[in-house]
Amino acid sequence: MRKFEHLISTVIPLDIENIDTDQIIPARFLKATSREGFGKNLFCDWRYDSNGQPKTDFALNKPEYKNARILVAGKNFGCGSSREHAAWALQDYGFDVVISSFFADIFKSNALNNGLLPVQVSEEFLKHIFEENRKNSDLELEIDLVNGTVKVLSTLKQEAFHINAYKKTCLINGYDDIDFILGNKSLIESYEAEQAIKVDKIVADNKGVFPEDSRTNNR
Amino acid sequence: MGKTLVEKIWDAHLVKRSEGFPDILYIDTHLIHEVTTPQAFDGLRRRGLPVFRPEQTVATADHNVPTLNQHLPIREELSRLQVDTLTRNCNEFGIELYGLGHPNQGIVHVIGPELGITLPGKTIVCGDSHTSTHGAFGCIAFGIGTSEVEQVLATQCVLQQSPKTMKIEVNGQLAQGVSAKDLILYIISKLSAAGGTGFFIEYAGSAIRSLSMEGRMTVCNMSIEMGARGGLIAPDTTTFNYIEGREFAPKGENWQQSIKYWQTLYSDEDAQFDSVITFDAADIGPMITYGTNPGMGMAINETIPTTYSQPSTEQLSYQKALTYMGLEDGTAMVGKEIDYVFIGSCTNSRIEDLREVAEFVKGRRKADNVTVWIVPGSKHVEQQAIAEGLDKVFEQAGFQLREPGCSACLGMNEDKIPAGKYCVSTSNRNFEGRQGQNARTLLVSPLTAAAAAITGKITDIRELLQVGS
Ligand code: SF4
């Protein structure tokens, strides 16, 4: 997995809420069997017209945003499908960080599992970024994962963001979850061996009454 | 203090909990399909790892398969390659595959329950967000990404933060013409597309209890459309009756033992939920969505909410959605002409859905301006529909009964809705482009879809039911 610690970069603003993973990468591009190459179809239906020509008014196509490695988007980013291809596409395009005021759960874990950093900020701070970016498209942000802060360099306004401590260690060191779980393999095996006994114990210990037995059954 | 159902099942599957780390959660059943797994199998190969518990893994081909001429090789090259890759991976790693042509093939969330693989108290994951469907049986079921698929293949475990719990109680009785689909679309419209994020939702209350298993699956299926990690319903006699006798269900003494365990699966009376919300079934009418996320829904006889009634920060996105849909705020939906009707997807493609549609359309014929596709959820559903003569009813109505798969739910195969066309759909997502580039999706119940097919317009089913009776 890619390592991440610190980044200073310009941003690409997408001031839209509820951006779902079908927009990030439409289903028709999910036929590939490798992780690479999804970047060219990132936001495909917003990015290109029906003749496949880039739409000049879409942020990703604006020359001033060419080198940005931070995507800033409206709340509930990444909702919908569990496709990890969304995280792969964002990364393949060149993003290292996505900032939003709210992320969908599965997207967030997919991103973290690939070293793409989801930075959740307050509505206010998000608005501040959008506003400052409107004034100045060269606006730079500094992301410091070690200290968990995001800073707007022109205004020096900064906010702390939260990342689960374990996930943070993984990102900084480039570890992944499989190494961690496999380190506990003997626990998994003993869990399996004891499962049946455990279930018997649950049945024996159950003091309550199965609710249906206390409900009238005529529905 | 008592435990919620989610906590009971979660705790029974904990392999390790340690301060500062996510839980290591044991997974009983891993369902896989062709789209979200190739990269996971490659990962295993790169690490030189086997599949840890292949016998707890079940595969099917569904997302990408054609729904016509399934006996022929898949024409579209990339789709064929993906399905072939799944076959190769299953062979290499020793996993049972219900591929095209197999009698058990179908949409992953339809076949799990119908084969008796989905059981109360289990933990079930799949690289698909609608895995929440299985929660209808009183199990913890949630969608995962491909890296997590690789985790589960390698370890039969997944790393997860322990869940927050929400209870949604719906009491009372649903009115005639109002179904489980309307119930869940109603809840989502009240809670919004993000309202359940981070939660496992337990559905309870008399309206939920009186739903069939099919209806319960429809409800749990769409939990993810509120952002929830999963949805579930405590098992009861309805659940046990549905499971009994199915291919992989426990039999004989095992069955008796299982029932004893399953009867411990309920939220204790003094259990604490992080959030509790209550609805009255009497407030729910037939629903329809008008926007580009499932939270943008309303009772079918209402008018589309105005832009200025939305929070100011959301007005831009709201307007963008209506523009995409070609709809105007403040206007009525009923009477609007439509082009396609899609009855299918893991939300509404089970035999009960097909029966309900058939009963309504019997002796009627579709409007000329509408193309109607019925895509059964599985080979078993298809076979049963034929055995019951539903195929004849559909044929006479001008509906096309196709072969099982995800089909126009996500438009990954050739079943796409053309740009600009309106599709009244029993699926679960109305995102931009979901059913085809620039296609416009209106989410409804199977009955409302059937009504639209007959009239060619968005129709309040209650009017037709009155005429009929
Ligand atoms: S039917 Fe639709 S929602 Fe269900 S699994 Fe297939 S693509 Fe996903």
Image: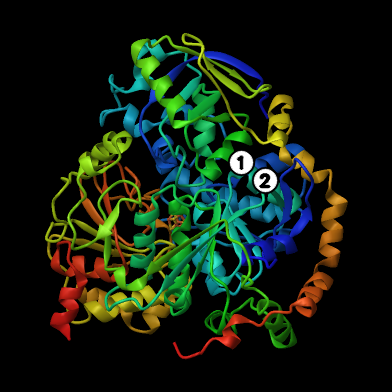
Reply above or below: B141 against B315. Answer: below
Q: Can you say which quadrant of the picture contains the C terminus of chain B? A: bottom left
Residue A120 seen in the current view: yes
- Compared across the picture, whether A65 is left or right of A90 comes to left
Mark sitting earlier along the chain (2/1): 1
Q: Is mark 1 within 8 Å of ligand 1?
A: no
Residue sitting nearer the eye, B315 or B353: B315
Looking at the image, do the residues carrying marks 2 and 1 touch, with CB atoms under 8 Å apart? Answer: yes
Q: Secondary structure at mark 1?
A: helix
**Relative image position of residue B240 (x, y in whole percent):** 58, 82
Residue denoted by label 2: B150
Q: Which mark is residue B323?
A: none
Residue A37 seen in the current view: no
**Relative image position of residue B67 (x, y in whole percent):** 38, 60
Q: CA distance from mark 2 to mark 1?
A: 8 Å
- Compared across the picture, whether B378 is left or right of B288 comes to right
Q: Which mark is residue B39?
A: 1
Please state which amino acid type lies under the numbered disc 2.
Glu
